[in-house]
Image: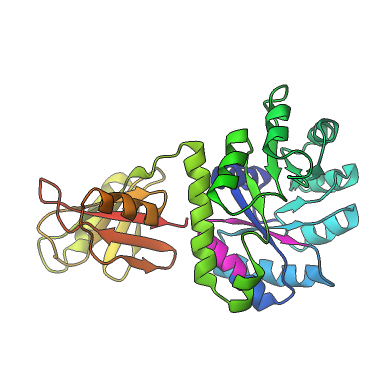
Amino acid sequence: MARFQRLEVLNTMLDTGLVPVFYDGNVETAAKVISACADGGARVVEFTNRGDLAYRVFSELVARFAKERPEVILGVGSVVDPGTAALYINSGANFVVGPVFNPEVAKVCNRRKVAYSPGCGSASEISAAEEAGCEIVKLFPGKEVGGPSFVKAILGPCPWTRIMPTGGVDATEESITQWIKAGTACLGIGTKLITKEIVAAGDWEALTAKVAQCLWWVKKARGVPLFLGCEHVGLYPTQAGGGAEVAAWYAKTFGFSEKVGNSSIFVSGPGPGRIEVFKEPKEPRAHVAIRVANFEEAVRVLQEKGIALEEPTCKGGVKSVFLKEPDPAGHRVHLFWSAS
């Protein structure tokens, strides 16, 4: 059974704009691929139904990530018939993708409220899929059916259509920009992103960096700014051990929740923004964390402005770096990027 509701899956696909697509028959290797993609910011990953007994590998992956990384949304690709769709849905698929449109697959997915993105190559196929309840249709093979110009042509008379091209999308700024500017909702990228060389070498850091870079190109093409706003404010107690009292005050006064870490406590509500309260005194003034859409690009831009930075910290899908000089009021400032 799917862990995520259909609307959450679709909205996440639309928000991130990228769905990594791959197959590997080794559970451990497949898990590392998915983790690397998630570390780069891609929460939605498509595992294709290619190898013998692929559903067994998928089932193990679903169970593992539900426990170890529950934020990851796993779905299945290369599904052409309702029996296979039902098998994977019962194995935990949160969405189903196929190279062709099959009305019977749509019925199976709709019964379980699972998102279905069938492969379409014409206006008529797209229309038929939408009439069957498909919110995001897969353009396949993306390059051969007309590429970005095809997307523009479809969206003219049908601006409500949401298209995800797969095949013909390269992991380059030029390709990603062309597709996004044409009006695609999100991009499916397979071996151009998860290359055989990266998998063979087990270079998961390279894959994570590549995914993060592609996501930045998607955001950039959409007009998302590099510097997004204040991620959190860091407060320091005036007395030893006073941080817990400060955090408790915010939690009690405003009904916020507390998340205790090694050296600090994050306090937050359901809305955006957090307060980081350090357990022990460290700085005389608060610090400000600026959230960025891409860490490496933000570092480059600041350095080009002549702003000196300290050594960056990269751990667990989070990257940060302090500016060497404080703001005019004496507050320290650091960049903050998170895969989540």
Locate residue 217 relative to residue 159 in the image: left or right: left
Colouring used for the render: rainbow
Relative to the observer, which residue lies in front, 71 or 40?
A: 40
Depth order, front residue of 297/128: 297
Q: Hey, which residue is sitting farthest top in the picture?
A: 157
**Residue 44 lies in the magenta stretch:** yes
Q: Quadrant of residue 11?
A: top right
The quarter holding residue 86 reads bottom right
Instruction: Specify whether residue 174 is in view.
Output: yes
- Magenta part of the chain: 33-48
Residue found at x 30% / y 71%: 262
**Image position, residue 253 (x, y; %):** 26, 46
Picture residue at 79% right of the left edge, 40% below the top: 145
Q: Position of residue 218 (x, y in %)?
A: 53, 45
**Picture coordinates of residue 51 (x, y %)?**
81, 70
Give the image location of residue 280, x and y in percent.
17, 67
200 above or below 166?
below
